[in-house]
Image (tube, rainbow, N blue to C red):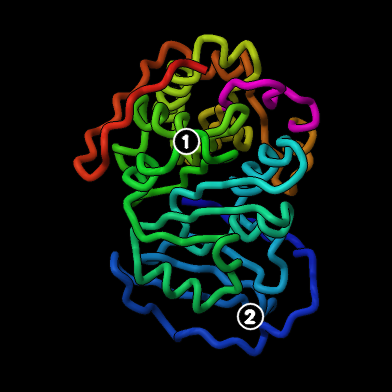
Amino acid sequence: MARRKTHPARRTPSNTGTLTFPTGPVPISTGTAEVIRDPDRPDHVTLHVNGVPSSSLDLGDPGFLDFEYMQQMAAVVGLLPAGPLRVLHLGAAGSALARYVEHERPGSRQLGVDLDARLIELVREWFALPRAPRLRLRADDAGRALAGVHPESFDVVIRDVFAGDATPGHLVGTRFAHTARRALRPGGVLLLNCADRPPLTVTRQELASLAEVFGPSAAVSGRLAAVAEPAILKGRRYGNVVLAAVRSGPGHTDLRDPALGRALRTLAVPATLLAGEDATRLAGTAPPLATAPDPTAPDPAAPAHG
């Protein structure tokens, strides 16, 4: 679930104007998919899944991100040490963020997971996605795939999965956060796309869940944050909130870094960073969420805090 913005892309030479896409929706395993091309910018396409904008790409510029929440996630990823990353995308769709990571961090190894097997086949056919092993795409339930990865195998885990306008119950809460934390290397970051409306009840409960799993020191050590447009954080309208939690480790990223705040404020649509104690205040007295049972996934042991 995302809002779009319009801004100039970083242009690169391209012959993608000659590409053709199906006219109208095509069937996929979970409904329909449609590629809509911008008549003014032929390289700019939007993937709609079941009528909802799911991914926006510039086929001539893999470093282009159109959705605000993805730009905010990219700013957080930019704090991690230079060099290739190992990234797990739960909710692959058109893989816009995976293309961005490939562009900005050459040599990265990424795994994108999407429930819809046919959609994965189509985006491979339609878009210029990196090939395996740089980007592997897997058709699977996100919770089951996450539970099956090796411990401490990713620098970044991104959850961007929706059923309608909400994240499925087995992909939120403390049990999910434990499983995601287990998949992260020390110093790795978990990024959640949380679509919420006033009074941000889901956001507060998800923050409380992250605080419980990532440990009592997560906020005071700058390992917990929320990012969104000011109007959303003030509870004035529906929108996307990016939640970030960092697994403790030597030299782990401090989300209170002024550079992150500056990067977010200078986006075309400025965003506010609530990190550390500000994130704790946003969570308030909200209780952690209990993750809904997922019969398709194994039961990983909950690791220690941090």
Residue type at numbered disc 1: Ala
Q: Residue at x 50, y 61 (%)?
A: 136
Q: Position of residue 275 (x, y in %)?
A: 64, 22
Q: Report the label total.
A: 2
Kindly identify the residue that appears in the image at 67 percent across and 76 percent down. 43
Of pointers 2 and 1, the one earlier in the residue sequence: 2
Label 1 CA crowd tier, 10 Å (few <14, some 14–19, many 20+): many
Local SS, label 2: loop
Looking at the rendered structure, the kind of residue marked 2 is Pro
Coordinates of residue 27 in the picture (x, y in percent): 32, 76
> In this rendering, is residue 93 above or below 74?
below
The answer to whether residue 132 is left or right of residue 14 is left
Measured Cα–Cα span from mark 2 to mark 1: 42 Å
Circles 2 and 1: CB atoms closer than 8 Å: no
The residue segment tinted magenta is: 246-260
Q: Is residue 255 visible?
A: no
Q: In the rendered view, would you say 183 is above or below 105?
A: above
Which of the labelled discs sits on residue 183, or is there none? 1
Q: Is residue 268 magenta?
A: no
Looking at the picture, tell me which residue is in the foreground, 235 or 265: 265
Identify the residue position indicated by label 2 in the image: 39
2 or 1: mark nearer the eye: 1
Badge 2: residue crowd in 10 Å (few <14, some 14–19, many ≥20): few
Q: Please, is residue 252 above or below residue 141 in the view?
A: above
For residue 196, above or below residue 175: below
The location of residue 105, given as percent across then percent down, is: 72, 52
Between 189 and 288, the one lying in front of the other is 189
Q: Is residue 45 visible?
A: yes
Tell me where residue 223 appears, x and y as whole percent. Answer: 61, 21
Q: Residue at x 22, y 34 (%)?
A: 293
Is 41 situated left or right of 140 in this image? right
